[in-house]
Image (tube, rainbow, N blue to C red):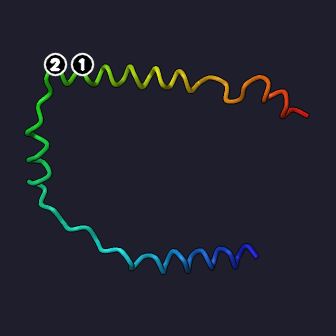
Amino acid sequence: MTRILCLLSLCVIAACGDEGAYPALVPLQEITGAATTVTVTPETAQGVEDRAAALRTRADGLRGPVLAPADRARLRP
């Protein structure tokens, strides 16, 4: 049964490979030229620091328990 599932999965993956078009190739100068025009200002740095602080605060909020104590007690046998 496992071999059949593996074979079927490989067939599905092989069938999906030809549907999408390859992305267009872009000269490297176009990519690197756009990257050099960006400048970092003190306001940019402050914005990044503010965003990082907000993300840390959000992460701290996600570290708490997922279930309320009443729900946890109800789910225990």
Q: Is residue 12 left or right of residue 68?
A: left
Q: Specify the amino acid type for callout 2.
A: Pro
Mark 2 neighbour class, 10 Å CA radius: few under 14, some 14 to 19, many 20 or more: few
> Is the residue 23 above or below the residue 33 in the image?
below
Going 79% across and 24% down the picture, which residue do you hit? 70
> Measured along the vertical axis of the image, is residue 10 above or below residue 26?
below
Left or right of residue 17, residue 51 in this image: left
Q: CA distance from mark 1 to mark 2?
A: 6 Å
Q: Quadrant of residue 76?
A: top right
Residue 58 coordinates in the image, percent (x, y)? 48, 25
Q: Where residue 49 sits: x, y (%)?
A: 30, 20
Q: Which residue is mark 2?
A: 42
Give the secondary structure at mark 2: helix
Q: Quadrant of the C terminus?
A: top right
Residue neighbourhood size for the residue with mark 1, other residues' Cα within 10 Å, grouped as few (<14), some (14–19), many (≥20): few
Q: Which mark is residue 37?
A: none
Quadrant, the N terminus: bottom right
Which residue is painted at 84% across and 27% down in the image? 73
Amino acid type of the residue tagged 1 in the rendering: Gln
Q: Please say if 58 is above or below 16.
A: above
Report which residue position mark 1 lands on. 46
Q: Observer-nearest residue: 75 or 33?
A: 75
The residue that appears at 53% across and 21% down in the rendered structure is 60
Name the element at disc 1.
Answer: helix
**Residue 2 % position (x, y):** 73, 73
